[in-house]
Amino acid sequence: MIVSTKLYIPQTRRDDLVERAAITELLNKGLKSKFTSVTLPGGTAKQQL
């Protein structure tokens, strides 16, 4: 079973984005590895990364 919400990239509102350079740099470093885990407390907007 494939969940339909996993078949497309959701649209974002570009007018309210906050640049987080440190997080972006860490995530970009993770692109070189086979697995990257993002672990943060609840309510910290992980899904928006």
Image (cartoon, rainbow, N blue to C red):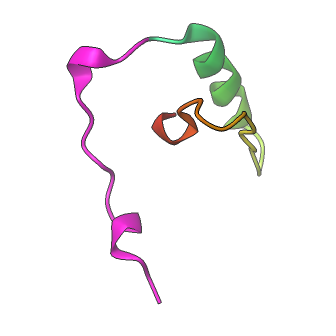
**Residue at 59% in and 29% down:** 44
Relative to 19, does residue 39 appear above or below in the rendering? below
Q: Is 16 one of the magenta-colored residues?
A: yes
Q: Residue drawn at (34%, 18%), measured in percent from left and top? A: 17
Q: Is residue 11 left or right of residue 22?
A: left
Instruction: Identify which residue, 26 or 46, lies in the foreground.
Output: 46
Q: Is residue 21 above or below residue 32?
A: above
| Image position, residue 39 (x, y; %) | 75, 39
Would you identify the image quadrant in which residue 15 lies?
top left
Closer to the camera in the image, 24 or 29:
24
Name the residue nearer the viewer: 46 or 22: 46
Residues in magenta? 1-18
In percent of width and height, residue 24 lies at 58, 20
Viewer-proximal residue, 22 or 28? Answer: 22
Q: Is residue 39 left or right of residue 31?
A: right
| Quadrant of the rendered image containing residue 18 | top left
* x then y, percent, for residue 33: 78, 43
Queried whether the magenta region covers residue 13, the answer comes back as yes
Q: Indicate whether 41 appears above or below 19.
A: below
- From the top left corner, tell me how far across and down residue 14 is, in percent: 24, 22
What secondary structure is the stretch in magenta mostly built from? loop
| Residue 18 shown left or right of residue 10 in the figure | right
